[in-house]
Image: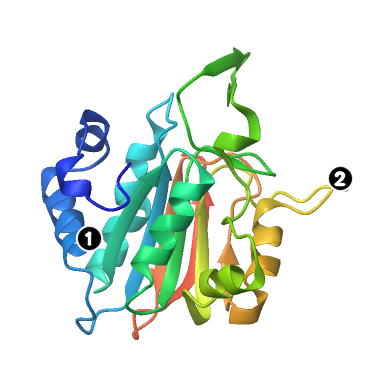
Amino acid sequence: RLVSDWSSDVCSSDLHRFSVETLNLLLENREHNVKDGRMLAVVFQGLFDPTGALASTENNTILPLIQEGYRVVLYQGKNPEEWTKGWLEATAVEPAPVLVISEHADRKSMRLSPEVMAKNGHDFKPAGGRSTEFRHFVYHNKAEKQRIVSGLANGGQIIFDGCSAGKKSIWGASLAERTRRDFSAAQPRDIWAPSDDFIDSHLVFNRDHHIIDVTYTDG
């Protein structure tokens, strides 16, 4: 979904997540994926949103990036393969200085699909298991991995808009730490990720429109 022809596949969830003005601009940027002098920012969302929290992505990241002059393109998908296809499509024209990954998360993964869900207390998880969870972009050989890594501009930045994606543990690397390793060849300047639950994130830019800080708050 929303990988090749978003304009013919806009559903009611998109209308709840975005204002009409923002949605129209995102559609235009997707349909005309060309260099135009603006810096490219690629935003990913899943379809899994039981609490409606993904509606905050517009104000948290998308609008600030647009206001700073970025060409923002949005991709949604229900599994890592769809996200990978979107990343390769978005960065086929030019590498992206900014990658935003927005979805309900824990320390290890992001949950992308609402198709079959089991509820355990306050913790929603897709019953489909890892096939619907994002842990990294999908590749099968070194050439495919190189295409994925080269999609991030050298010194680019990655922003996680998902709870606890940066939480450290003695049991293994966090999602943010693993992503830094995956993109190490691109030498990412910063990878921003919350260490706990949050409600809002705030992007801070310098005079050259580069992100210099991301803060996460719980209210």
Q: Which residue is mark 1?
A: 30
Residue under the image location 22 percent in, 60 percent down:
30
From this viewpoint, is residue 187 visible? Answer: no
Amino acid found under the numbered disc labelled 2:
Trp
**At numbered mark 1, what does the secondary structure look like: helix, strand or loop?**
helix
> SS at mark 2?
loop
Q: In front here: 184 or 120?
A: 184
At x 23%, y 67%, the residue is 67
Image mark for residue 153 = none
Amino acid type, residue under disc 1 in the picture = Arg
Tell me the residue at 30%/46% (across/down).
Answer: 2
Query: Does 18 appear above or below 184?
Result: above
Q: Position of residue 53 (x, y in %)?
A: 40, 34
Left or right relative to 96: residue 9: left
**Looking at the picture, how far across and down is residue 183, in whole percent?**
62, 71
Q: CA distance from mark 2 to mark 1?
A: 39 Å
Find disc 2 in the rendering and name its residue. 171
Percent position of residue 133, x then y: 58, 39
Q: Is residue 120 visible?
A: yes
Image quadrant where residue 114 sits = top left
Give the left or right position of residue 205, taking residue 127 as reference: left
